Image (cartoon, rainbow, N blue to C red):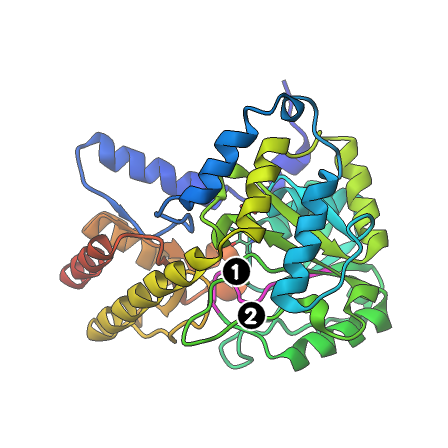
């Protein structure tokens, strides 16, 4: 049996590698604390679970779902966008149900990228922005993303020959892994740039609902002209603690929505309709859980920033997301530091380089970990160093 060349071109999937190391340690009876993965540790709010329990008993939901999402689901997505951001969308042509935003990101590549085409990808970002391109024979242009530029991916420095073969650009703020947020002027510049170079912008807004110190993230689609060049991805995963449910949506430019929908209709058969009903409850039901979640993460953020400071690791306090992006101590690479911490302290942190070349010199610490485990992890790192 011979797998395709592109399989060899894929980097090892970050979390799979972390999981393997963790399991090896656990098999030896060692208590490993993982600060590596961004998966909420608290459960889905009860009213959403109740909606699912009811929806699953509806036989109409037992049949194949609609490819594009149930009409009531797409209408709920549009209504949520209107309530939350004041963005108007046509649920018939400008909203598409996704089996999680990861699925949408991956399927945008066959819709937009021919072999050899470039995708403009943030210098650090969600890994699928890069691996999705590899799977279709595309190429990645990493947009520089540094602390000096506020971790705002620098699309303006993209060389002309790359731009001539580029079709799509990913952006994502509040940002995983750097936790940076973007001023709206940056979005406006991106829109002008995309118009000039005929690019689709995909704004991944997975963390729109998680903001601290009063920060409330905007939608990219609030910006004038955004819908001419952009789609935005929203997910129930982080906002409503629904990572396991696999439900999200794409919204915005109708041509891009249509192209993505065409790829999907040839590959998958949509989101389980009962799950869509639960997501409708999440979006249009009580929203108190979001404030509670933010209070929880904000408390943990303060605890981590203070503890890191006490051991000489520096990090800017995030205003959004569930990550702290911390600089590694002098004399270590990201991978060396992550490996030292796992070996010596039995704590998993994600090496910054797993998110792209500009991650060198950083680690990512996830706040989706109970308070006492977070404090213990940092205590262990302190003792190990
Ligand atoms: C978690 C995450 C996703 C994946 O979301 P799903 O809807 O669960 O697939 C997408 N983008 C970013 C930046 C994320 O951190």
In the picture, the quarter occupied by the N terminus is top right
Q: Please indicate, yes or no, whether residue 113 appears anywhere in the rendered image.
A: no
Check disc 2 and report the residue beneath it. 217
Which quadrant of the figure contains the C terminus? bottom left
Q: Is residue 171 magenta?
A: yes
Asked if the residues shown at circle 1 and circle 2 are in contact, with their CB atoms under 8 angstroms apart, the answer is: yes
Residue sitting nearer the eye, 65 or 3: 65
Q: Residue furthest top?
A: 1
Q: Taking 23 as reference, is 97 left or right?
A: right
Q: Residue at x 19, y 55 (%)?
A: 372
> Marks 1/2: CA distance?
8 Å
Majority secondary structure in the magenta region: loop
Q: Nearer the viewer, residue 261 or 186?
A: 261
How many marks the image carries: the answer is: 2
In percent of width and height, residue 304 lies at 28, 66
Residue 124 location (% of width, % of height): 54, 62
Image quadrant assignment for residue 141: bottom right
Please provide the residue range marked out in magenta: 169-179
Instruction: Confirm or reject: label 1 Cβ below 8 Å from ligand 1.
Output: yes
- Dot 1 or dot 2: first in sequence order is 1
Residue under label 1, please give it.
207
């Amino acid at each position: 049996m011979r797998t395709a060349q592109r399989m060899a071109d894929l980097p090892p999937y970050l979390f799979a590698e972390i999981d393997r190391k963790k399991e090896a340690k656990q098999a030896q009876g060692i208590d490993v604390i993982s600060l590596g993965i961004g998966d909420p540790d608290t459960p889905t709010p009860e009213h959403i679970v109740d909606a699912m329990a009811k929806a699953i008993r509806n036989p109409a939901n037992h049949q194949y779902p609609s490819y594009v999402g149930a009409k009531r689901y797409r209408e709920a997505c549009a209504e949520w966008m209107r309530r939350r951001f004041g963005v108007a969308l046509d649920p018939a042509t400008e909203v598409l149900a996704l089996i999680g935003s990861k699925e949408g990101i991956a399927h945008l590549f066959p819709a937009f990228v021919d072999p050899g085409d470039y995708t403009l990808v943030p210098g650090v970002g969600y890994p699928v922005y890069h691996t999705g391109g590899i799977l279709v024979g595309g190429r990645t242009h990493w947009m520089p993303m540094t602390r000096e530029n506020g971790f705002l991916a620098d699309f303006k420095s993209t060389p002309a020959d790359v731009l001539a073969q580029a079709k799509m650009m990913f952006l994502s703020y509040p940002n995983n892994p750097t936790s940076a947020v973007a001023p709206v002027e940056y979005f406006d510049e991106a829109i002008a740039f995309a118009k000039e170079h005929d690019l689709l912008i995909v704004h991944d807004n997975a963390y729109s609902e998680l903001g601290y110190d009063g920060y409330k993230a905007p939608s990219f689609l609030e910006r004038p002209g955004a819908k001419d060049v952009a789609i935005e991805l929203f997910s129930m995963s982080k906002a409503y603690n629904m990572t396991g449910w696999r439900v999200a949506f794409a919204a915005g430019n109708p041509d891009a929505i249509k192209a993505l929908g065409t790829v999907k209709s040839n590959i998958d058969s949509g989101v389980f309709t009962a799950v869509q009903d639960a997501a409708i409850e999440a979006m249009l039901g009580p929203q108190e859980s979001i404030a509670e979640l933010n209070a929880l993460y904000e408390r943990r953020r303060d605890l981590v920033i203070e503890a890191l400071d006490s051991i000489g690791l520096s990090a800017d306090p995030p205003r959004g997301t569930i990550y702290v992006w911390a600089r590694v101590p002098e004399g270590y690479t990201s991978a060396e530091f992550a490996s030292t911490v796992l070996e010596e302290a039995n704590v998993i942190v994600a090496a910054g380089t797993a998110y792209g070349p500009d991650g060198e010199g950083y680690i990512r610490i996830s706040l989706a970990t109970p308070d006492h485990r977070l404090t213990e992890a940092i205590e262990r790192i302190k003792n190990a160093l």
